[in-house]
Image (tube, rainbow, N blue to C red):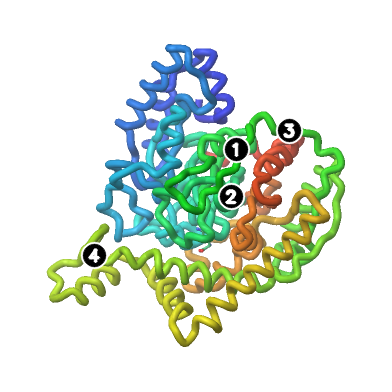
Amino acid sequence: MHHMTLAEIARGLADKKFSSVELTQTLLARIAQLDPQINSFISLTQDLALSQAKAADERRANGESGALLGAPIAHKDLFCTQGIRTSCGSKMLDNFKAPYDATVVAKLAAAGAVTLGKTNMDEFAMGSANESSWYGAVKNPWNLEHVPGGSSGGSAAAVAARLLPAATATDTGGSIRQPAAFTNLTGVKPTYGRVSRWGMIAYASSLDQGGPLARTAEDCAILLQGMAGFDPNDSTSIDEPVPDYSAGLNGSLQGLRIGVPKEYFSAGLDPRIAELIHNSIKELEKLGAVIKEISLPNMQHAIPAYYVIAPAEASSNLSRFDGVRFGYRCENPENLEDLYKRSRGEGFGSEVQRRIMVGAYALSAGYYDAYYLKAQKIRRLVKNDFMSAFNEVDIILGPTTPNPAWKLGAKSSDPVAAYLEDVYTITANLAGLPGLSMPAGFVDGLPVGVQLLAPYFQEGRLLNVAHQYQLNTDWHTRTPTGF
Ligand code: GLN
């Protein structure tokens, strides 16, 4: 049962081959048996899952249908879940039970999805290895000595290990696409404003976007359908109609113009990954796509700009965690200042503290113009590069990451080395564009992802291209040994 995709589960439930309760029990048992190896969950919600599954079975018995009705999923532990711990991977929020459901959580619950639990993540979504979680590192099911990517490493590892078919995640600079690449999954970072951020605990508000992680583009279409849409509670949510993503999967790729940026194939890219990306290009050419070399000249400035803007926003967003209103409070504070200092010093881990310091510095009166304002100008140049490119091509294709998943601990003492691995993903967040990563092969037994980017609100185009690619390749069907 655990090998089924969301689409297969929907058909099985509709054909009464099994019930949602049976499926939920099977997966909960599998999580209990296998998750200790990979540490992908922070909390399990067995009682909620079984009551949601029972309700979904009743709704089906009463004639209701729907691709998510009775489908088991999990939420990255930064989506607020009413009455359930929402930790953000941090000691700071270890005791925080959200008073309400995030819009994404409420929408998926209304569609009949069954929540198995909350998945592990880098603390406050800062990271690309899932090693900064207060609940311990997540392991990559493809090789337990390697990282699963981050910050949505728990969602990715759980889906890759077949503990469940799909999970929610968020992407501020690559945290859906990069773990998807590292664990052989398909993941979509939607257009900024496509998915509501209400109840999604903020890291960098102008970059954060929720989206699906699953094994196939077909499943990402199903989960994104349940997540996307206008939300009056989120002032950055956009009131654009949501297309039927599943219905759009079968479009022909004949004449599709694919842009391949020459800057992507620079010295930093593992040549074995470059070869796999070229193979995926050939595969898409066979399906009728036309390849064109393009240029994104400001890409080289994206990492420095992102690592000013994201920490700047984080330093502001995380100021609310002060020991007074939310989460952790130090023991016996001597006075108010001691309460702030020790609650934050003890509650936040070192990567979060580093980002708060960098961000506060970049926003300070003497340095604002030199760092923050400059970074915002670069952000516009990055966006302009994409706008010119999309005058000539329909999608942009390249590697998701320059290297495959590294060994646990390999970059822990050198944060900048980890930041550099985000080179291909962060530009989409700076520009607000949608992106997708899908499986494209293996290097030393570790999965490699190919990234597709599209113009605003063209998630459907990304899903269509990925689905056609997956109908003609079988990388996405490979399963890690032992799972
Ligand atoms: N690795 C990037 C960072 O640490 C992106 C994280 C994310 O997308 N949440 O900021």
Whichever of callouts 1 and 4 sits on the residue coming sooner in the sequence is 1
Rendered view: 46 above or below 12: below
**Residue 4: x percent and y percent?**
55, 28
For residue 315, which numbered disc appears in the image?
Answer: none
Within-10-Å neighbours for mark 1: few <14, some 14–19, many 20+: some
Mark in front: 1 vs 3: 1
Which element type, helix, strand or loop, lies under badge 4? Answer: loop
The residue under label 4 is which amino acid type? Gly
**Residue 40: x percent and y percent?**
43, 46
Whichever of callouts 2 and 1 sits on the residue coming sooner in the sequence is 2
Q: Is mark 1 within 8 Å of ligand 1?
A: no
The residue under label 3 is which amino acid type? Leu
Whichever of callouts 1 and 3 sits on the residue coming sooner in the sequence is 1
Q: Which residue is mark 3?
A: 471
The residue under label 1 is which amino acid type? Val
Disc 1 to disc 4, C-alpha distance: 40 Å
Q: Which residue is mark 2?
A: 189
Disc 2 to disc 1, C-alpha distance: 15 Å
Please give the name of the residue rendered at 24% of the width and 72% of the height, measured from the top-left corner: 340
Whichever of callouts 3 and 4 sits on the residue coming sooner in the sequence is 4
Disc 4 to disc 2, C-alpha distance: 33 Å
Which element type, helix, strand or loop, lies under badge 3? Answer: helix
Task: Answer left or right for 42 relative to 95.
Answer: right
Which element type, helix, strand or loop, lies under badge 1? Answer: loop
Please give the name of the residue rendered at 30% of the width and 59% of the height, measured from the top-left corner: 91
Mark in front: 2 vs 1: 1
The residue under label 2 is which amino acid type? Lys
Whichever of callouts 2 and 3 sits on the residue coming sooner in the sequence is 2
Mark in front: 1 vs 4: 1
